[in-house]
Image (tube, coloured by chain):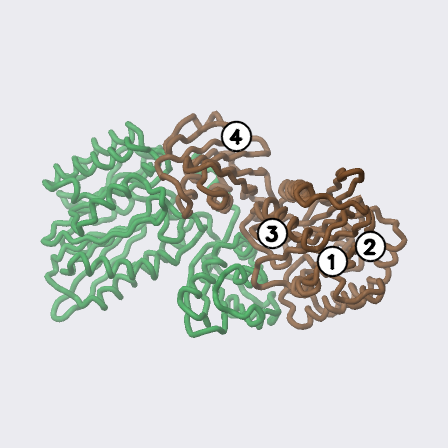
Chain colours: A green, B brown
């Protein structure tokens, strides 16, 4: 069901020839309303891709009827021609859906620098069939989710149903992304839909909270994408208006679910690592410390080798400006306290490794906690990313 | 000759059994004066190793007669016992050299967490033979340079002789370090000697300038060590006092030479990459932009695969707070302008790769330039760092 789990939404996905592999590459999600509320967050990279530049201005009014997404080319660093491609795509989709171009958001993913005349023609020429497929309602949302995959090995989707008063409302979602997952989002596209009846301002607050506590804390390789986009569309079709707090909680839960799906499918990863810092003077300190460890190639290579090298953890803590006493740091790996007060404790050989690895750091400087998720640094990561465009 | 190229210095290196390999592991450099001026810079990591904590306080008065260095154990995160080991080493060396413990600096390199009773005993018991070897003058500085190697494949040394007025003075140096080479130095130990007659205050200014323009701009894997130390000792034995500017220039040149030797020997590197940002509004902007690219695993993996993936360069520029127009960035790889005004230019296939790779970024925002050196991300890097301690 993915994005169509929420009532008021249709979706479609098909192949227009953007990928050499011949796999699906063009995707559409349409909000039939009655509401057309939308909220979105975009990459904090200052060198943004053209679809992001387009969508930022198109979503600024809190209204959108559709999102067109493509894989097989990021349309990034393609200059004015590339921006015009995004605009033309929105214009043509708007005509087909009988709405304005500014009600259509655009997302692209794939290689940077790809976005020439062929790319434009194949997308624009494919739009009538795409809109027709969405109208026909033949897609349960699966095709749309598959057409946005790049190096993903599986489609990532979520569905949630929640009671509110006498009624119920739904959330649906799809995501893609397997590399460049880093702060302020990732090469990650996420479309979330809900039939809850909420104004754009509430959707916006809820979305910012949810992404800050989920996607923003997934940092697989420290690299920040140029195309990251998370869109939340509200159709209001359920007629139900949940209170903001419970809606935010459900949305955050859904985003954490998608984040975990992205995490376990990260390019070349052999271990899924959760780094939790506790005893921090603030949540910001906890996240900073966890993220500094998540960024250490030496630490990530050690985990690949199943070496519980806690020294590389403490060394990373030392690179931050968080509040702590350098002589009082504890490190626990997979439940074994290998370092107490910044000195060796339990025998590292007693640490048992599985696919999931937990690293717990105690700063003993306050009551706050924060987790950042990352992947190990593997031969497969090097291989995938040295051969991606060739 | 290494550190003994400058007159007034003796050195020695020998094996005391700290390394399983049985290779040399204990090293000594003695300054016979007449001056005992010293300057030193240490890692900016807040979780510093015990020898750094010792040497920081011992060198604070600008005076030192000797440095004892060991490989085969970093004596880091070994608690009060480890600090006492550094102090005992200085005390025993001071007795043998008939000076105070505070005139003896200590440097250690190797695995974090290693620094127990055996480690202490072997070092302290080895000191008489070490001092005797230095007194005998049998070492031309080579043994000292070899005894500080860890994963280094070659010893790194420099020698310089310069005229000043009617006389001449000399600089000698040795360095180790092959991984964790990152900002504010690296797992890097550098001992520099000079027979120029300069007070500690001048040595300090010259050393800070030289390291800021050399070692601080080598960032092979973004990881900051806990043990980094650069020491400059001045014996004054030449009786020559060069002007500060020319001494600083010679010292900077010597440090750049050592930095290049560290760079080409970086763990697992297949390509030595120089990232130069020009057209920057400030030197700090230029270095920030170059360093952000040097830290990108995606970029570094692409260079390993000899893929001139300029999109990953522009994307990294976008993560910085430097002054630039996102639509006006040029990228040149090995002399081929593959990106002009943030759009594709020359065919990337025309880039020819060799061991040395130059990446030039033009921000078109000012007159300043800065280079950061890094290595590619290779299978060998992953292998060496996942198997290091096992």
- Depth-wise, is mark 1 or mark 2 nearer the camera? 2
Q: Nearer the viewer, residue A18 or A183?
A: A183
Q: Which residue is mark 4?
A: B334
Q: Secondary structure at mark 1?
A: strand
Residue, disc 1: B70
Residue tagged 3: B185
The CA distance from mark 3 to mark 1 is 18 Å
Q: Are marks 2 and 4 in contact (CB under 8 Å)?
A: no
Among numbered discs 1 and 2, the one appearing first in the sequence: 2
Q: Determine if marks 2 and 4 fall on one subunit.
A: yes
- Left/right of residue B215 with respect to residue A322 in the rendered view: right
**Separation of marks 4 and 3 at Cα, in angstroms:** 27 Å
Residue identifier under label 2: B34
* Residue B189 in view: yes
Q: Please, is residue A218 above or below residue B162 in the view?
A: below
Residue at 15% x, 47% y: name it. A65
Whichever of labels 3 and 2 marks the residue nearer the N terminus, that label is 2
| Mark 1 crowd level (few <14, some 14–19, many ≥20, 10 Å Cα) | many
Q: Are marks 4 and 3 in contact (CB under 8 Å)?
A: no
Judge if badges 4 and 3 mark residues of a common chain. yes
Which disc, if any, is residue A271? none
Label 4: element kind:
loop
- Percent of width and height locating residue B40: 67, 56
Choose between B295 and B385: the one closer to the eye.
B295
Q: Marks 1 and 4, how far apart in space?
A: 40 Å
* Marks 1/4 same chain: yes
Q: In the displayed structure, does residue A159 sit left or right of residue A269?
A: left
Of tags 3 and 2, which is closer to the observer?
2
- The chain carrying label 2 is B
Q: Residue at x 10, y 61 (%)?
A: A239
Q: Earlier in the sequence, mark 4 or mark 3?
A: 3
């Amino acid at each position: 069901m993915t994005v169509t789990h929420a009532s008021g939404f249709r979706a479609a996905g098909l192949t227009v020839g953007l990928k050499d592999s011949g796999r699906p590459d063009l995707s559409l999600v349409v909000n039939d309303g009655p509401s057309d509320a939308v909220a979105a967050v975009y990459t904090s990279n200052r060198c943004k891709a053209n679809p992001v530049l387009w969508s930022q201005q198109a979503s600024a009014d809190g209204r959108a009827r559709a999102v067109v997404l493509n894989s097989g080319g990021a349309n990034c660093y393609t200059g004015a021609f590339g921006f015009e491609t995004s605009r033309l795509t929105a214009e043509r989709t708007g005509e087909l859906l009988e709405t304005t171009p500014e009600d259509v958001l655009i997302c692209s993913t794939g290689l940077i620098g790809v976005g020439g005349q062929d790319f434009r023609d194949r997308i624009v020429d494919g739009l009538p069939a795409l809109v027709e497929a969405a109208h026909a309602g033949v897609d349960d949302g699966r095709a749309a989710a598959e057409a946005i995959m790049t190096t993903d090995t599986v489609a990532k989707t979520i569905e949630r149903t929640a009671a509110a008063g006498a009624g119920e409302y739904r959330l649906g979602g799809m995501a893609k992304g397997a590399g460049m997952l880093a702060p302020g989002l990732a090469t990650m596209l996420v479309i979330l839909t809900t039939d809850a009846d909420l104004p754009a301002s509430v959707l916006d607050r809820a979305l910012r909270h949810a992404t800050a506590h989920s996607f923003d804390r997934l940092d697989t390789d420290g690299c920040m994408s140029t195309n990251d986009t998370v869109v939340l569309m509200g159709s209001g079709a359920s007629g139900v208006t949940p209170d903001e707090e419970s809606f935010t909680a459900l949305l955050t839960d859904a985003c954490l679910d998608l984040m975990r799906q992205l995490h376990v499918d990260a390019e070349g990863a052999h271990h899924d690592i959760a780094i939790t810092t506790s005893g921090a003077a603030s949540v910001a300190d906890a996240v900073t410390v966890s993220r500094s460890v998540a960024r250490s190639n030496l630490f990530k290579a050690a985990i690949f080798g199943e070496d519980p090298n806690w020294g590389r953890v403490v060394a990373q803590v030392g690179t931050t400006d968080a509040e702590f006493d350098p002589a009082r740091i504890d490190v626990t790996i997979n439940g074994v306290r290998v370092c107490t007060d910044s000195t060796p404790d339990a025998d590292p050989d007693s640490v048992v490794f599985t696919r999931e690895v937990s690293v717990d750091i105690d700063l003993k400087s306050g009551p706050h906690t924060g987790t950042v998720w990352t992947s190990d640094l593997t031969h497969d990561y090097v291989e995938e990313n040295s051969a991606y465009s060739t």
